[in-house]
Image (tube, rainbow, N blue to C red):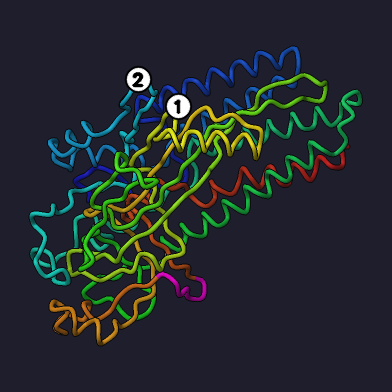
Amino acid sequence: MNQHNIDFIGGGFKLTLPYTFGGWILWVLGLIITGIGVVAAVSDPIGLAVSVIGLIVLAAASPGSMSAGLHKIRKEAIAPEILQAKAEQSGYTMENWFLQQSTLVPTNDPSDWILPAPGPQTWNNNMYGPHGDGTPLPEHPAKVGTPQPATMTSHLIFAGAAAILTLVVGAVITMDETAEVGVTPALVIAGLGLILTLVNFFRAKALRQMLDTPTSLVRSAPVGHPELVGQVRPWAAGTMTVHVDSNQSMSMPNMLGYRWTYEQYQCRTVRDSEGNSKQECSWVTIRTDSGGVPFILQDGTGGIKVNLESFKRTNYGQFIKQWDGAFAQTLGKQLMASAVAGLLGGATVKKHRWTLYGLRSGDPVYVLGATRPRPDSEIQADPQADGTLGNSTIEVWGNEDAPGMKCTLMRGSELSNVGKSRSGFEMMVPPILLLLGGLSLIGLA
């Protein structure tokens, strides 16, 4: 991997800046908001609350320690015609101006292949057999190793500063005798810190599990709980065409697993403490659905059956496609949506949104599951599972955790999933600052 000019060992600290046009816009916007807050704080310390918002934007716009390098590798390693084809399918499209219907396909997919992956025209007839010469795929950990995110990046600087300024604003409000807020700000800050600490603890734990678990090769995968990385290919069940919300105009072919959500942008009129009316709007999830079929994970050394629907923890990463409109897809659904929202919550439906996530044939996949022997009856009914390949006689399940190890299925290779992650230290420091600082503020009330 040295030829790609990227160091997969992040080290102690790395200055990270945006590497996309959109990222830079967000970063500059955060810088401007932070500056406005600093200027406002000259006359009123509460103005620092504006800077907190700006710092949060800056933290969000600061990528992981390897994100820029992996993005560059993807552009250099994958054939230009493939990247061009994906670019033409991506972006925002106005489907119907009158009905305000549009679609959005992300232009940057951090869970996609970073190094070239075999195309369908090169796949073997025997789904369990090795690919080509039987060596692991280019992006397999056996070839690229396991990356280590930098302990600290620009994200920690901005997120840590946002946490500290939040405590400063909380202290100012708490000590303001005219405000008479008591311990409310302290409790809110401590509560937010506790929630974020718990969320990030489990995220950091999942990252540590991925980094510490050695990746097995399919051809020698043991019965137990191996970590496997490879390419998604159809099993005997084939692929699915998913019709989002049962609508033929919102379809996606070649799917092996999916999850979609239907949301409404609902607005309702409320009154504040002074009796003034105002409108509050938010996206509300109305319904969702998910499903999948078994697939083959091919890592170059062989293929193994994975029972996708058995996994309780699936992460498909960024959405595949999003449909947006001012109206529901049919008049009947529009009238029903408006009636239900009005009767149940006194709300008006302003917009509708359908979002599809999933795993498609050819995608990279990371699996940590339980491997067990396949039933004899199934092996006998499978003409390609003749017993000469050990990996054809076992399958992966996701409903049987091991002590200290949670079964997980993630779209993306280990390289792409770790590459977009932050270190456990960076995840934990800001929320712990909020939690401990909020508890300390209680003494000032």
Q: CA distance from mark 1 to mark 2?
A: 10 Å
Numbered circle sitting on residue 270: none
Kind of residue at disc 1: Ala
| In this view, 318 is above or below 51 | below
**Residue toward you, 335 or 109:** 335
In this figure, which residue is indicated by the disc labeled 2?
97
Which residue lies at the image location 8% right of the left edge and 63% below the top edge?
A: 132
In this figure, which residue is indicated by the disc labeled 1?
326
Q: Position of residue 84 (x, y in %)?
A: 17, 33
Q: Position of residue 445 (x, y in %)?
A: 88, 37
Q: Position of residue 281 (x, y in %)?
A: 60, 29
Quarter of the rendering containing residue 256: bottom left
167 lies left or right of 75? right
145 within the magenta span: no
| First reached walking from the N terminus: tag 1 or tag 2 | 2
| In this view, 245 is above or below 129 | above
Quarter of the rendering containing residue 275: top right
Would you say residue 11 is visible in this rendering? no
97 lies left or right of 219? right
Kind of residue at disc 2: Trp
Would you say residue 445 is visible in this rendering? yes
Q: Secondary structure at mark 2?
A: loop
Within 10 Å of disc 2 (Cα), the crowding (few <14, some 14-19, many 20+) is: few
